[in-house]
Amino acid sequence: MAGINQVEFDQVFMTWYKPLRNFVYYKTGDMQVAEDIVQDTFLKIWEKRDTINILTVKSLLYKIANNLFLNRLEHEKVSFNFVTEYQGNIFSSAPDFELEMKEFDRRLQDSLAELGEKERIVFLMNRIDDLTYSEIAGNLGLSVKAVEKRMSKALAYLKNRLSVKI
Amino acid sequence: MNDQYLNIESPERSETEKLILDRASRLQVPDGKTAGEALAMLKTRIAERGNNSPRLKKRDLKLVFWTASVAAALLVLITIWQVWSHSTLISVIAERGSHLEYRLPDGSRVFLNADSRISFSGRSFMKKRHLTLDGEGFFEIARGSTFTISTPNGDIQILGTSFNVFARDNSFTVSCLTGKILVSALGQTVTITPGETSMLSGESLVSYKNEDVKLSAKWIDGEFVFENSPVGKVFNEIERQFNIKFAPYRIKDKFFTGSFSNKDLQAALEIICIPLDLNYEIGSNGEIFITENPE
């Protein structure tokens, strides 16, 4: 049956807002831009709500967000400012180690910014949003095989950039 | 490698790979708006466009007036009936600055947060498990017939379970920890199961998966957890927990993520004010003054 009502729209919004915003953030590295794009995405869904099928709304969301991102005029160089969690108790006894981890995290973020966009999105959806390969495949309209491939490509790239002495 | 996750512990993974996978999973995207705030913003935008929002016609307004009049008359009747039939109305009140645990006649337990009250009929409670709540409470419902809670903002029907209800001002949020709950408000109904939260968003009752559902009941242990909450809401909770008042303050929109304990007012104020660049001062009459640090 076509069309979603307002309650369904709100549910779709509450369910998909965060994953979708993260998805755009992984593309842009700019939270403000990500929030704007996701707002516009849902506005489009709202305008077309009478013709939208609730079963396919998820992949539509990702497609619209992707298009809005591509249509933006300025594409600035991507850089990330993720927040990192340090387990205070463990690290406080080893300040050197904490410093080393901070340095590692900084290099990790820089390398993520250089990584190809496709690989980066898949990698971060898996690591940060805790999505399974099949969930990622479903969201992005890919095969699970393709997700696996991007994942190992991402890991190989990062490994190459971040070889550390332990 | 399985479909689910990369196996970090797999023996053939190198140390570097393990480190990358582990550190990457600890990254968090920077704070942004919560989904609820973003939805409210979108609704404002939609309303501003105007073309899609149904408008009340004059005729409708007349109808609204008559309906309201009849409703008002009914309300008076109902109140009289309630005063008569609830002559044994029992009210349990947690005053500002205090929490309370109460066992209902059927064995169900209620934890009331500060500045909250429940009331029920001592005469008919065992026949029809029904109570009204104003404020915030955590419930552990004993097995038995359907249990109903009415709040000014919506109703909840429970089938044996534990859950948190926040019904203050315009907010109505129900988080389910165990069991299954039927929530209704404004003529809409949703069923929520463990790990889900239902809330009133504007005119509609929505439900969504909430990873932090357990945090909603943290207040029972005296810990108050906020994720990207407008600072005004956080100060309101401080007022209720410590039974104090803030002097009227003028500060920019700020959002607080973190928690405070109800054991120590000074510590709670510091936890909120320092990260948000605010100053506080406790006046001689106990009133608290909030100012913004100059840029």
Image (cartoon, coloured by chain):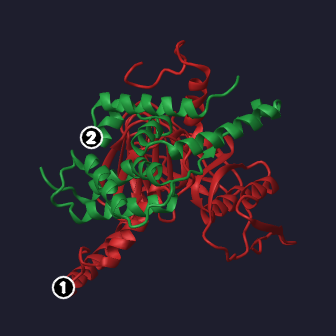
Point out residue A151 in the picture as x, y percentages from the top left corner: 42, 31
Amino acid type at image mark 2: Gly
Outermost residue on the front side: it is A160
Point out residue A61 in the picture as x, y percentages from the top left corner: 30, 52
Q: Which residue is mark 2?
A: A141
As drawn, B96 above or below B295? above
Nearer the camera: disc 1 or disc 2: 2
Horizontal side of B166 relative to B293 (left or right) equals left
Q: Nearer the viewer, residue B63 or B126?
A: B63
Crowding at label 2, few (<14), some or many (≥20) Cα neighbours within 10 Å? some
Q: Which residue is at a point 69% across and 76% down the rendered structure image? A: B248
Give the CA separation, mark 1 to mark 2: 49 Å
Indicate the secondary structure of the residue bearing disc 2.
Answer: loop
Horizontal side of B260 relative to B199 (left or right) equals right
Outermost residue on the left side: it is A1
* CB contact under 8 Å: marks 1 and 2: no
On the question of residue A96 being in view, the answer is: yes
Chain ID at mark 1: B
Q: Nearer the viewer, residue B224 or B16?
A: B16
The disc at residue A43 is none
Indicate the secondary structure of the residue bearing disc 1.
Answer: helix
Q: Nearer the viewer, residue B81 or A165?
A: A165
Q: Colour of chain A?
A: green
Amino acid type at image mark 1: Arg
Q: Which residue is mark 1?
A: B59
Q: Which chain is red?
A: B
